Image (cartoon, rainbow, N blue to C red):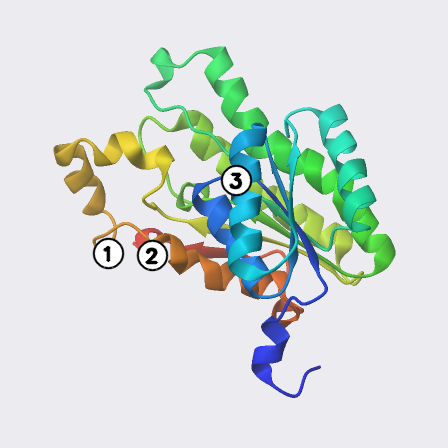
Amino acid sequence: MTNNVLDAFRLDGRIALVTGAARGLGFTMASALAQAGADLALAGRSSGPLEEAAAAIASATGRRAKAFVADVTSGADVDRMAGEVEAEFGRVDILINNAGVNKRGPIQELSEADWDLVVDTNLKGPFLCSRAFGPRMVTRGWGRVIHMGSALSAVALPGRTPYASSKAGVVNLSRVLALEWAGTGVTSNAICPGAFGTEMNKSLMADPVKFKDFLSIIPMGRLGELHELTGAVVFLASEASSYVTGSALFVDGGWTAR
């Protein structure tokens, strides 16, 4: 227990791994964790963007940041990455399962490959990464695993079959792990963002009519801004959330309150 409530949000001395960290929400969350004092392992498929992200975070925060190329849909690749990260940093205290993709369209237009890509990345990836890092956290007696759900973990939209299915699964994956790890010092929670102005929503924003209709379902009437996710991730990654596990924190402008 700290003397100052703000100290409970500090991450000094912690090591965080963020998947899908090269841009968008992943980069924003990684930057926030570094600002709070953590050193960063950034994971993704492409070395160039990851290296740029790591350099930008290190320059802006003075924290150590290193890129690791990995395919989170491959158990062998995740295990290899886990070994490389721990060889470099010694351990991982905070895991952010952020890597995600989307394929939109009515079900009759979606292929089996579309389904496999989305579900493997969005749901199998968090399973594999949690399996690789979570038990090691349990052995050490402290850890934070944060999964990226979505407003579509709880509600549905037409044309989002693979994405909504995967994100609903992510929340229950998080809950199961919370029960398995309860009392060990390791927590498992989900952050469920609504719509943010990221690359994933670029096509939606480019269609004025569809975009206006979409905004009408959000009570606050706008997309989220990237910085509006940072408080949630620092909270769940820190000692401030020590009695929070198995929860889903919705950051969605009121979308799922309807």
> Disc number at residue 219?
1
Mark 2 or mark 1: which comes first in sequence?
1
Identify which amino acid the numbered label 3 is placed on.
Answer: Glu
- Classify the position of the C terminus by image quarter: bottom left
CA separation in Å, label 2 and label 3: 38 Å
Local SS, label 3: helix
Residue type at the position of mark 2: Ala
- x%, y% of residue 94? 68, 54
Q: Quadrant of residue 138?
A: bottom right
Q: Residue placed farthest to the front in the image? A: 59
Which secondary structure, mark 1?
Answer: loop
Q: Position of residue 215 (x, y in %)?
A: 21, 46
Measured in 3D between alpha carbons, the distance from the residue under mark 3 to the one under mark 1, in whole angstroms, is 36 Å
In which quadrant of the rendered image does the N terminus lie? bottom right
Of marks 2 and 1, the one in the foreground: 1
Residue 188 horizontal/vertical position (percent):
65, 53
Residue contact between numbered discs 2 and 1, judged by CB atoms under 8 Å = yes
Marker disc for residue 257: 2
Name the one closer to the observer, 32 or 165.
Answer: 32
Q: Amino acid at mark 1?
A: Pro
- The residue lying toward the viewer, choosing from 181 and 133, is 133
- Residue at image coords 51%, 53%: 29
